[in-house]
Amino acid sequence: MSAVNVAKIKASWDPSTKSTDITGSDEDLFSLDASKWTKIYVEFLNGDNSTYKRAFEVKKVKTQKGAESFFIRENSWFKRKIPDAWFKSHYRVALDKVLPVKDCMKRQTSTVTKSIPLKLLKGNPKGGVGIGEKLSGDKPKLQVVCFADSQAGSLNLTMESTDTPECIKAPMQIERPGHQPFMLNGVSSLSSVKAVAKTAQPVFVFDVDDTLVSEKLKEKNSRIAMLSQDRFFETEKNISRYLLDLKKSYPESKIVLLTNGFITEQKLKAIGVDREQRENLVILENNKPKSKEEEQALKKITKGERLSAYFNKYNIPHDEIIFIDDTMSCHQEIADTFYDKTVRHLFYVGATHNKEKVACNAGFCNESKLVFEDYEDITLAHNLLEQMQRFSEEVRREFIQEQREAFKKQMRQG
């Protein structure tokens, strides 16, 4: 077998749930020869930063409608002869669920919709107190209300099939007592951002931490060394190229990075955003506080106030704002400030599992159950992401079944 036909991919591994997710590029996979079993090497990264490498074989398959995905089997001939009832690799089963599906034909967007009960979004995944069942400290109660075109007591998930990466949307309305209600779309991918813009010159406002960049933790209560390039990683593949394409599509628009964190330049550099690109971004970040008093003062200034100050200082038109953030309270701050403007809220949930680990490992909460009790937006994001992943798997399984039926038909015809 020629070396060019061997793909190397990287994936995460969660031993507690025996689940995985592809974290590296899948370009090598899609460049493989179609309808030919080919060896691939997968490097799994565990939560403790240890790695485990496994070899499998995959075969790229394609439907008549232009979608591509893969069958997967054990690399060992001997293991393939053992019935699954006796031997079933957890790694293979987990990979089979997340192998990507690519729509290779540029055509009109097709959508698939699934309705889910709202109660599935409100429950605590670990059996503790759920959304709206109690207040946490002095935080306002979060109420999830279904969007106007959804059925009563349910929420619609919509998957769009285009030539862009898969994205699942969940439209909803958020209401907090004493605050401005607002419409919001939970999204599984940043690929949806361009599609929601309705004007020629929108302002794109991105959060940074757990929206564009995530941070690995070395071990409980211990962060990886500040200078390590391995400390930060992309929430999605090719963030740098994504920001570049967004700027090309909207050359007159401002792309603002609005963060409560620090060292944004270092984070962007770590994920491959070069200096020229960084110069085309507006970075609004706080200076690291030197005292507890400074830290408390910074917390009183909302993202809405900081963004408004930037618009006013530089006289930036902002008739349409596309706001992408993973924290519900930040969406509320923007909604309260720009209630008289068109704001399209995208609640990004793609990095939710990493946020849960950070909250536990950094000592914010003693156990995951309390994470969901104290951070209602993490509960919502976790439940949304779980439903989105199930939905994606169902759609993918239907695609694989369609391909298998096509193979059977071809065999019968001769």
Image (tube, grey):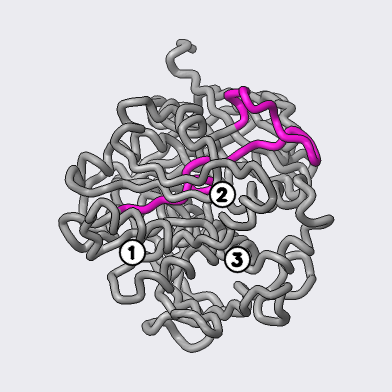
Identify the image quadrant of the C terminus: top left
Q: Which residue is mark 1?
A: 111
Q: In the rendered structure, find residue 351 and report the number of the disc placed on it.
A: 2
Amino acid type, label 1: Thr
Tell me the mark number nearer the camera, choosing from 3 and 2: 3
- The residue sitting at 18% across, 61% down in the picture is 199
Q: Determine the main secondary structure of the stretch shown in magenta.
A: loop
Residue 337 within the magenta-colored segment of the rendering: no
Quarter-of-image position of residue 202: bottom left
Residue 300 shows in the view = yes
- The answer to whether 198 is drawn above or below residue 259 in the figure is below
Q: CA distance from mark 3 to mark 2?
A: 13 Å
| Three-letter code for the amino acid on which mark 3 is drawn | Asp
For marks 1 and 2, give the one nearer the viewer.
Answer: 2
Q: How many marks?
A: 3
Amino acid type, callout 2: Ala
**Vertical side of 303 occupied by 231: above or below:** above
What residue is rendered at 77% in x and 35% in y? 222
The residue identified by callout 3 is 377
